[in-house]
Amino acid sequence: MHEMALCEALLDAVERRAAGRRVTALRVTVGALHRVPREAFDSAFEVLSAGTVAQGAGVELVLLPLRVRCRSCEWADDADDLLGSCPACGGRDVMSEGGDELVLDIIRVAGSTEDISSDEPSVTGGN
Ligand SMILES: [Zn+2]
């Protein structure tokens, strides 16, 4: 299941960042192209986080649209999916940007009121 793999990558990042502290809440930004249904994500997270520092943590899932732009007429908008043609002029020269994000924005750990924001924001990018 796709959301399982995504959750595993996310939990790796959470555990690195938490460094052994118990995580009470986290916020993650996921691009529309990952096509992660919120409910599927929640249940995958619940299963995979069992026994980890993130067990029982509240998860705020922020879904990010991708940005599409037509190179023929300069039409641009946000979309949930890739477009085969431009809705404004019907042209097929449509570019898209983003939508593949997977970013662990913030975690909060037990005993702290401060959010730990990211110094290595992308879970999947780089290495
Ligand atoms: Zn167009």
Image: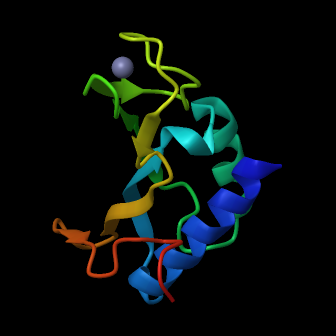
Name the colour scheme: rainbow
Task: Give the x, y percent position of residue 112.
Answer: 22, 72
Residue 72 picture location, percent across and down: 34, 27
Q: Residue at x 73, y 61 (%)?
A: 5
Dividing the picture into quadrants, the one containing residue 101 is: bottom left
* Residue 105 drawn above or below residue 59: below
Depth order, front residue of 37/107: 37
Rendering coords of residue 41 (x, y %): 63, 42
Q: Decide: is 61 above or below 88.
A: below
- Using the rendered view, name the quadrant where residue 65 is placed: top left
In this view of the protein, can residue 102 be seen by the observer?
Answer: yes
Q: On the rendered structure, is 80 left or right of 72?
A: right
Residue 119, quarter of picture: bottom left
Identity of the residue drawn at 40% across and 64% down: 104
Residue 120 vertical placement versus 44 (above, below): below
Q: Position of residue 66 (x, y in %)?
A: 41, 38
- Quick one: 17 or 33, which is closer to the camera? 33
Question: Which residue: 59% across, 25% down?
Answer: 84
Residue 64 sits above or below residue 70 on the image: below
